[in-house]
Image: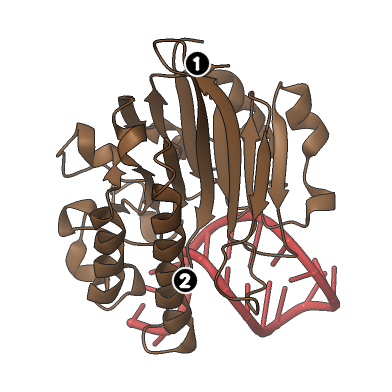
DNA sequence: ATGCCTGCGGTTCGCAGA
């Protein structure tokens, strides 16, 4: 491979979406896939089908909801499950994989990729919103530590944050929502200010790039979407960015997830 | 708009999502 393609996709139930996923893997041909909302325990994850498609599998699941995973053509050198900072947090929302790659000069490098599923946080004013903000603080702390490694790092996932009004078809409709609260947006800006680049916004200022369309009220047909799935790049990863795009057409497939894949290519190759 | 869909767990409805 010339580039390493990394994609994030909130699949909204991997067992209900396995045919969809296998079809998409063939079409999109990603090297590393970050899945969110797998909605299953690790034992029930459709591991064999995905391995047969050529991917290594690392899961961090839980019963019924949440759950994240990383699929990779590259071998995992290391897998870390759970976001540090709260020993009482039993929700499966974070998994990190480490891979051996080479840069354009052929020099060996470590590539770190995180699949994260940030809490929704609704309704505002409840413990759910407090959990969201606390989780974002923990992510910020963790990211700050990782930046000291000065390695290419991709923080990919469903952030459940609309960064700017331009990231929603109808921003006014989200004013009271946890996804568009000033505190949520500010926390995402704090993460960016540490030195992370929003990959999609690095390549386009288009106002109709969305990654989620609600199942309800004909949101897809009206293109009433929001951009909440993000790939945040460390400086060392941003330097390697070749392309970034949203695979919007997947939303029109039979039995779709309400999210679509968001993809980047990095100027790296498998070691 | 209280809702509209969808997946899941566990049963024919409630919860969570965004």
The residue closer to the viewer here, A213 or A189, is: A189
Q: Is residue A28 left or right of residue A243?
A: right
Q: Is residue A5 left or right of residue A183?
A: right
Residue A90 at what x, y percent from top left? 67, 73
Q: Quadrant of residue B7?
A: bottom right
Q: Residue at x 35, y 42 (%)?
A: A234
SS for dot 2:
helix
Res. A57 mark: none
Eyeballing the image, is A232 above or below A67?
above
* Label 1 environment density (alpha carbons within 10 Å; few <14, some 14–19, many ≥20): many
Residue A132 at what x, y percent from top left? 44, 74
Residue A190 at what x, y percent from top left? 26, 63
Instruction: State the hue of chain B.
Output: red
Q: Quadrant of residue A3?
A: top left
Q: Residue at x 39, y 24 (%)?
A: A266
Q: How many marks?
A: 2
- Which numbered mark, 1 or 2, is in the foreground of this view? 1
The residue closer to the viewer here, A214 or A90, is: A90
Callout 1 and callout 2 share a chain: yes
The chain under label 2 reads A
Eyeballing the image, is A126 above or below A249?
below
Residue underneath mark 2: A135
Which callout, 1 or 2, points at the residue further toward the start of the chain? 2
Residue A263 at what x, y percent from top left? 41, 32
What color scheme is it? by chain
SS for dot 1:
strand
Q: Quadrant of residue A159?
A: bottom left
Q: Residue at x 57, y 66 (%)?
A: A84
The residue closer to the viewer here, A268 or A133, is: A268
Residue underneath mark 1: A269
């Amino acid at each position: 491979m010339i580039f390493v393609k990394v994609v994030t996709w909130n699949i909204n139930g991997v067992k209900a979406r396995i045919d969809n996923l296998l079809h998409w893997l063939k079409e999109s041909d990603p090297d590393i896939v970050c899945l969110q909302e797998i909605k299953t325990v690790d034992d029930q994850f459709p591991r064999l089908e995905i391995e047969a498609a050529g991917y290594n599998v690392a899961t961090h699941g839980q019963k019924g909801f949440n759950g994240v995973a990383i699929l990779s053509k590259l071998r995992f050198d290391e897998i870390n499950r759970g976001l540090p900072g709260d020993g009482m947090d039993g929700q499966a929302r974070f998994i990190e994989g480490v891979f051996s790659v080479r840069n354009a000069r052929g020099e060996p490098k470590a590539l770190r990729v995180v699949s994260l599923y940030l809490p929704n946080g609704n309704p505002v004013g409840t413990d759910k919103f407090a959990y969201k903000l606390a989780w974002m603080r923990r992510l910020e702390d963790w990211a700050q530590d990782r930046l000291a490694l000065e390695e290419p790092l991709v923080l990919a996932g469903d952030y459940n944050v609309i960064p700017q009004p331009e990231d929603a078809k109808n921003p006014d409709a989200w004013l009271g929502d946890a996804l568009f609260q000033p505190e949520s947006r500010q926390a995402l800006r704090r993460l960016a200010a540490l030195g992370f680049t929003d990959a999609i916004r690095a390549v386009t200022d288009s106002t109709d790039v969305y990654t989620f369309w609600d199942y309800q009220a004909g949101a897809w047909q009206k293109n009433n979407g929001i951009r909440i799935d993000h790939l945040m790049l460390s400086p060392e990863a941003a330097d390697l960015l070749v392309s970034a795009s949203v695979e919007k057409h997947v939303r029109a497939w039979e039995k779709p997830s309400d999210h679509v894949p968001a993809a980047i290519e990095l100027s790296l190759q498998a070691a």
